[in-house]
Image (cartoon, rainbow, N blue to C red):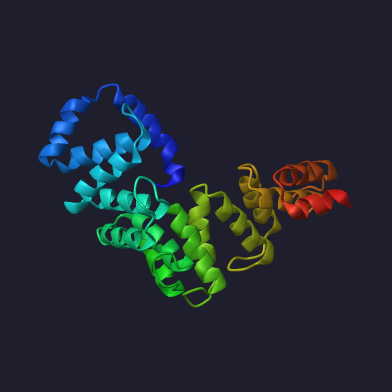
Amino acid sequence: MKRIYMLALFLQMCCVMAYCVDFEELTKEATKGDVAAQYSLANHYAYGNGLPQDYAKAAEWYGKAAEQGDPEAQYCLGALYHNGYGVPKDLEKAVELYKKSAAQGDMDAQYNLGLCHERGEGVSQDYGKAAEWYNEAATQGFAEAQYKLGQCYYNGNGVQQNYKTAAEWIKKSAAQGVARAQYSLGLCYYNGNGVQKDYGKAAKWIKKAAEQDYAWAQYSLGMCYKTGKGVKRDKSKGLKWIKKAAEQGYERAEAALEK
């Protein structure tokens, strides 16, 4: 089960594919041991494309493909164990499968291993190992991992604190459209951390995140408009963005409206 932000596109593709899939033939090939067929059949069960959604059957077929060393199946089965879908929740088993997949270069598995080490899920909490796995995925262009690695450098978690390196990784993630990376990059420009202080660039990146309904960015953009930092001062626009953040339950925005 690939990461959530990939799910919509995957489902669109599968909906088209489901019309031309011969599931009887696919099952026959999977039963014969064809790893591609096993992985495909598992996906159809996992997402309910052309077949009734059944996580248990998805886990069964992912398991068969995973036993043959398929990295994507190993990752997907690990995700099922991680969340307890179709199998009992087992974080240690999830980590075991992620490691097998990550060793073969799967970015999703590398990223999830980073999360597991950061949070202490299925393994002992270890920020250094978290940063190592984020780095593996980040260097392959994985946007969320780039953001997380940037945060490691920004806060000195598992690596030596370095604002410049942090900003470089966060910028890579922001360029790929990750809202929280865009917001963080805006703060880097606002405070001059790792980059030259530039209120105009700060407002630009914060706005990109705000337009993706990122509440913290909406509040910050509202304050930029209220104070004229990086944008032309406009109290009306400032109030509009602060209201958007408040509507999402962001407490600082709610407090600002009460004043």
The percent coordinates of residue 206 (x first, y second) are 65, 51
Q: Residue furthest bottom?
A: 160
Task: Say how many tags the image has.
Answer: 0
Q: Is residue 90 above or below residue 218?
A: below
Q: Is residue 69 something one can see in this rendering? A: no
Residue occupying image coordinates x 25% and y 37% = 40
Q: Is residue 248 above or below residue 15?
A: below
Judging depth in this view, the residue of 207 and 136 nearest the camera is 136
Judging depth in this view, the residue of 46 and 13 nearest the camera is 46
The percent coordinates of residue 212 (x first, y second) are 60, 42
Residue 227 occupies quadrant:
bottom right
Q: Residue furthest top?
A: 19
Residue 38 occupies quadrant:
top left
Residue occupying image coordinates x 24% and y 25% = 21
Judging depth in this view, the residue of 190 and 102 nearest the camera is 102
Residue 191 occupies quadrant:
bottom right
Q: Is residue 31 something one can see in this rendering? A: yes
Quarter of the image with the N terminus is top left
Residue occupying image coordinates x 55% and y 55% = 181
Q: Does residue 93 appear left or right of residue 147 in this picture?
A: left
Residue occupying image coordinates x 62% and y 68% = 193
Q: Is residue 239 above or below residue 123?
A: above
Judging depth in this view, the residue of 35 and 56 nearest the camera is 56
Q: Residue furthest left?
A: 32
Q: Does residue 196 appear left or right of residue 134 in this picture?
A: right
The percent coordinates of residue 55 (x first, y second) are 34, 41
Q: Does residue 64 appear left or right of residue 248 in this picture?
A: left
Q: Residue furthest front?
A: 88
